[in-house]
Image: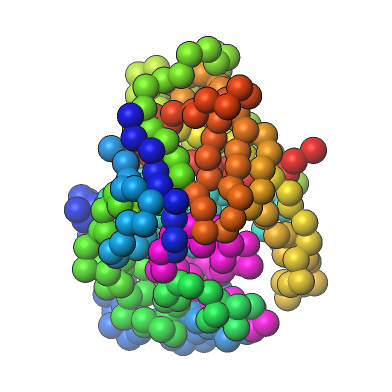
Amino acid sequence: MTTVGRGRGVRGRRTATTAALLAALATAALAGCTGGNGPGDDGRGRDRGDHRTASPGATGPSVLAVKIDNAGTARPHTGVDAADVVYAEQVEGGLSRLMAVYATRLPEVVGPVRSARESDLELLRQFDRPILAFSGAQTKLLPLIDQAPLRAESPSDAADAYFRGGDRPAPHNLYLRPGRLMAEAPGRAALTTGFRYGPVPSGGTPTTSRTVRYPAARFTFTWSDARERWLVGMDGSRAATADGEALAPATVVVQHVKVRESAFRDFLGNNTPYTETVGAGKAEVLRDGRTFDARWQRPDAADGTAFTTPDGAPVNFAEGQVWVVYAKAS
């Protein structure tokens, strides 16, 4: 049994699809990531463009966190299956966006990459100076990103790490080569999430499927006995990578949090939701075909998140990828 300490914030296999994507877009990559409105989100604002971990106070290279577009036109994704943790949050218009966190493996390509949000800065404080890869951000948010204890890497910071794909329209076609931001995966010690991994807890409720709904998006996780994983569905369709690999985490967490208005709006005037990940509340942990009622607690932004049973016992996660879906607390 292993626990993840307090956070102070193998390259993926080559596939024919990934190789074809890179080859087909070599011209665009060599030409750089600029042109038109630039490589960022949409040309508005300035572009910035076994999972155990060590004990508290671990030092060394930190994680790579990549903001992932999750609009229908951005799917299928590339490289999300290699992430150790995938966070799902609500954004403007009731849509969803992902943040993929890499510590034990770096895929050759990740994307499509999209813009950062204010909530990301609080979420990433659990890691020791993580790399945040993103397409851009609102002009008023950029100073907060600059002041945050992280290494911001947008296309304007690291143009050679990004390229535009020709398989879909902008802004849903920006891809990242992680190997150009870090030489190798930092390893388990960097993954200071607070998660605890170990044998399946006793009890729980047999579960075949669980759906989390946002105003204009939904996630469905369906248990597969054959895969011993939760198969991901997005907006009613099976979720897979560009190589056809099903997105299938070992553990899914539905974390009930406060979602409030932020000080920011998009270009249409829609307010950007702020997902509060510091505090405490209810959660459900899905693993091994069962749902375990839990309580989450993150006292400070520099802490990881602990999940316990109603009587205070730690809830173990299954070894493998974890998805954390933030649901608005009722």
Residue 128 visible in the displayed image: yes
Residue located 28% across and 64% down the image: 60
Residue 180 in picture, x, y percent from top left: 27, 73
Residue 247 in picture, x, y percent from top left: 41, 39
- Residue range of the region highlighted in magenta in the rendering: 113-140
Residue located 43% across and 80% down the image: 155
| 83 over 221 or under it: above or below | below
The reply, left or right, for residue 230 in relation to residue 17 is right
Residue 293 in picture, x, y percent from top left: 61, 24
Q: Quadrant of the N terminus?
A: top left
Q: Nearer the viewer, residue 35 or 69?
A: 69
| 47 over 24 or under it: above or below | below
**Type of secondary structure dominating the magenta stretch:** loop
Residue 73 visible in the displayed image: no
Q: Nearer the viewer, residue 90 or 7?
A: 7
Residue 261 in picture, x, y percent from top left: 78, 61
The reply, left or right, for residue 56 in relation to residue 11 is right
